Image: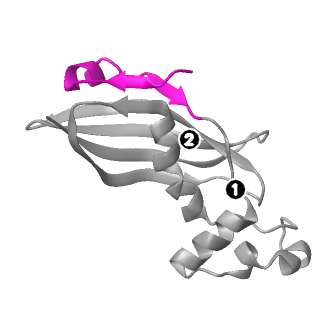
């Protein structure tokens, strides 16, 4: 699927209620999980101790941090949409976020996104993006929710 290209609020507005796209899959290898643990100081064994996880984890494997899965959202989002004529874009919030299934080391995830709503706040576009992060070849989603971004058009 090609990227959605938006040049104005009016173009954005026409997409409310529509699926915007699906990103490519990206793998979450142990190296990325360990680097995330270092960055966030969250070294819980289920994420970083591969030997212990084989025996003590119900997954028999290390798993990605839930917040690592969430942190992939901007990278995956940029594969779906390209917004022009912007001064800036700001993350505004998350709503109804729910982790549905753990992402095991080495699994790949992708983003499916639709434009849930769009509101004009005195020239700032408040976009609510309904998203799901899917795990390749798995029926349950890793994460679902609504991400809210503020787009400041020029």
Q: Nearer the viewer, residue 150 or 4?
A: 4
Residue extending farthest to the right is 55
Mark 2 residue element: strand
Task: Please tell me whether residue 17 belongs to the stretch shown in magenta.
Answer: yes
Q: On the picture, is 144 further left or further right than 48? A: left
Is residue 125 at all visible to an observer of this figure?
Answer: yes
Residue 25, relative to residue 40: is it above or below?
Answer: above
The quarter of the picture where residue 55 lies is: bottom right
- Which quarter of the rendering shows the N terminus? top right
Range drawn in magenta: 1-23
Does the residue at mark 2 contact the one at mark 1 (Cβ under 8 Å)?
no
Q: Nearer the viewer, residue 117 or 151?
A: 151
Q: Nearer the viewer, residue 103 or 41?
A: 41
Residue under the image location 66 percent in, 40 percent down: 25
Mark 1 residue element: loop
Percent across and percent down for residue 124 are: 16, 39
Residue 114, relative to residue 131: is it above or below?
Answer: above
Task: Please tell me whether residue 19 belongs to the stretch shown in magenta.
Answer: yes
The quarter of the picture where residue 139 lies is: top right
Q: Nearer the viewer, residue 75 or 70?
A: 75
Mark 2: give few (<14), some (14-19) or many (20+) Cα within 10 Å: many
Q: On the picture, is 116 further left or further right than 79? A: left
- How is the rendered protein coloured? one colour
Percent across and percent down for residue 97 are: 48, 53
Q: According to the image, label 1 marks what residue? A: 28
Q: According to the image, label 2 marks what residue? A: 132
In three-dimensional space, the C-alpha distance between marks 2 and 1, rounded to whole angstroms, equals 16 Å
Judged by depth in the image, the label closer to the viewer, 2 or 1, is 1
């Amino acid at each position: 699927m090609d990227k959605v290209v938006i040049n104005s609020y009016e173009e954005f507005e026409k997409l409310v209620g529509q699926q915007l796209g699906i990103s490519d899959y990206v793998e979450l290898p142990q190296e990325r999980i360990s680097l995330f643990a270092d960055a966030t100081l969250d070294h819980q064994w289920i994420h970083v101790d591969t030997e212990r996880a084989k025996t003590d984890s119900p997954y028999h494997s290390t798993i990605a941090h839930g917040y690592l899965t969430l942190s992939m959202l901007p990278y995956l989002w940029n594969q779906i949409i390209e917004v022009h004529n912007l001064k800036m874009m700001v993350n505004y919030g998350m709503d109804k976020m729910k982790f549905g299934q753990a992402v095991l080391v080495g699994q790949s995830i992708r983003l499916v996104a639709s434009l849930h709503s769009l509101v004009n706040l005195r020239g700032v576009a408040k976009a609510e993006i309904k998203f799901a992060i899917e795990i390749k070849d798995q029926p349950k989603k890793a994460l679902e929710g609504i991400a809210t971004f503020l787009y400041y058009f020029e």
